[in-house]
């Protein structure tokens, strides 16, 4: 095949031959030159243009010619510029099979269109199992999102450490899901986060909103964060609810470490079965915890009662923790703050195991304890 570098010199030689040849020979030489340009085209568009020129000029040329070779797009397009990647990030190259993109190990979610996806749904469609979605600052509509694969969703903080906001109800139904450095804003009323199965590790994040109150004494179905036979691990998070329960669990496991949890309505945590463990965490609310048939451990925490609660005891007193129906209760090294006449513990006789040690109120006094709980 003729190289592009030789074409100018070859064209000059052909022109000299044409000048000294007869009309028929001149036409033949000219057509040969035009065909050599067709076979040396560097792109489909260039080849089509040169082929059209050849056909127009050489209509009477009926000589058999070898077909022009197909254009190797990858080779002729030149080197592909590599994507700029941050240090330590995995490759985000995309392989395409039959016109469809394969899953990506690393996806950037950016509402301005500077990443791989503009919406959370689109990002989850692109990311591979065990892959990572990195979210740039901004507000994203996440209402109705259901996560069914193991993925990590991590926020990139903006100026002033502003976390990306995922607004709406998000459901997790897969193992080994991670949320890190996000702000989850619940819908106008309902769960911001619902775990229906699997496990979620929520880190360095905030969750806020309001939910609908539950019917106490039966399995809860509403909560700012709802856990149903799943495992939720919270580390260095802040959860705040202005209505309904902050955490409602129906079986499963909830583990808190260095978490601040508040509720300005009734009950911060409603545990109906399952295991609840809190270490080095702070709680504030009218009633911190209401437990039926669960295992409860609060270790090294600080609990603050913020207002009166007239619902959970026969006595007209404030109550911080109410437990019944075979609940296992462990309270160790905790500090309880509240009103001077607050009653912190409403422990029913049906509690199967009680381990209370080295706890005190804010002034160092021993804890007052109420009798029978109303809801059993």
Image (tube, rainbow, N blue to C red):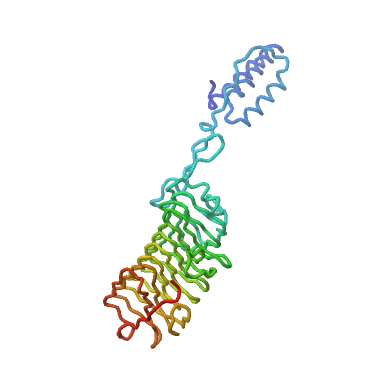
Identify which residue is drawn at 38% across, 65% down: 294
Q: In front here: 337 or 371?
A: 371
Identify which residue is drawn at 64% across, 12% down: 64
Residue 158 appears anywhere in the view? no
User: In the displayed structure, does residue 104 sit left or right of residue 345?
Assistant: right
The answer to whether 321 is drawn above or below residue 203 in the figure is below
Residue 191 appears anywhere in the view? yes
Q: In front here: 249 or 103?
A: 249
Residue 289 in the image, given as x and y percentages of width and height: 41, 72
The answer to whether 247 is drawn above or below residue 147 in the figure is below
Q: In front here: 106 or 75?
A: 106
Picture mark count: 0
Residue 132 in the image, given as x and y percentages of width and height: 44, 51
The answer to whether 73 is drawn above or below residue 201 in the figure is above
Identify which residue is drawn at 69% across, 15% down: 27
Residue 262 in the image, given as x and y percentages of width and height: 45, 74
The answer to whether 158 is drawn above or below residue 78 in the figure is below
Question: Quadrant of the image for the C terminus?
Answer: bottom left
Residue 248 in the image, given as x and y percentages of width and height: 46, 66
Residue extending furthest bottom?
340
């Amino acid at each position: 095949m003729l190289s592009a570098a030789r074409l100018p010199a070859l064209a000059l030689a052909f022109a000299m031959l044409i000048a000294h040849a007869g009309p028929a020979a001149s036409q033949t030489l000219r057509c040969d030159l035009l065909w050599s340009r067709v076979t040396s085209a560097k792109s489909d568009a260039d080849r089509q243009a040169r082929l059209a020129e050849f056909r127009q000029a050489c209509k009477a040329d009926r000589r058999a010619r070898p077909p022009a070779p197909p254009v190797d797009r990858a080779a002729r397009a030149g080197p592909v510029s590599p994507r700029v990647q941050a240090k330590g990030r995995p490759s985000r190259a995309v392989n395409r099979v039959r016109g469809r993109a394969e899953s990506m190990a690393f996806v950037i979610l950016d509402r301005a269109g500077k990443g791989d996806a503009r919406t959370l749904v689109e990002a989850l469609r692109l990311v591979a199992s065990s892959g990572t979605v990195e979210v740039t600052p901004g507000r994203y509509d996440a209402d109705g999102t259901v996560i069914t694969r193991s993925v990590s969703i991590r926020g990139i903080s903006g100026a002033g450490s502003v976390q990306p906001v995922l607004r709406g109800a998000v459901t997790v139904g897969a193992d080994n899901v991670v949320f890190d450095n996000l702000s989850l804003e619940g819908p106008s009323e309902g769960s911001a986060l619902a775990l229906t199965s699997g496990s979620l590790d929520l880190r360095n994040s905030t969750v806020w909103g309001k939910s609908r109150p539950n019917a106490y004494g039966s399995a809860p179905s509403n909560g700012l964060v709802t856990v149903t036979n799943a495992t939720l691990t919270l580390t260095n998070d802040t959860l705040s609810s202005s209505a309904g329960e902050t955490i409602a669990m129906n079986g499963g496991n909830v583990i808190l470490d260095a978490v601040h949890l508040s509720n300005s309505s009734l009950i911060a945590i409603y545990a109906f079965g399952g295991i609840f463990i809190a270490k080095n965490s702070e709680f504030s609310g009218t009633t911190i915890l209401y437990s039926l048939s669960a295992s409860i451990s609060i270790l090294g925490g600080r609990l603050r009662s913020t207002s009166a609660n007239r619902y959970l005891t026969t006595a007209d007193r404030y109550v911080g923790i109410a437990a019944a129906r075979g609940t296992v209760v462990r309270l160790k090294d905790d500090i309880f703050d509240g009103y001077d006449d607050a009653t912190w513990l409403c422990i029913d006789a049906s509690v199967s195991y009680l381990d209370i040690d080295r706890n005190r109120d804010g002034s160092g006094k021993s804890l007052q304890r109420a009798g029978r709980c109303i809801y059993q």
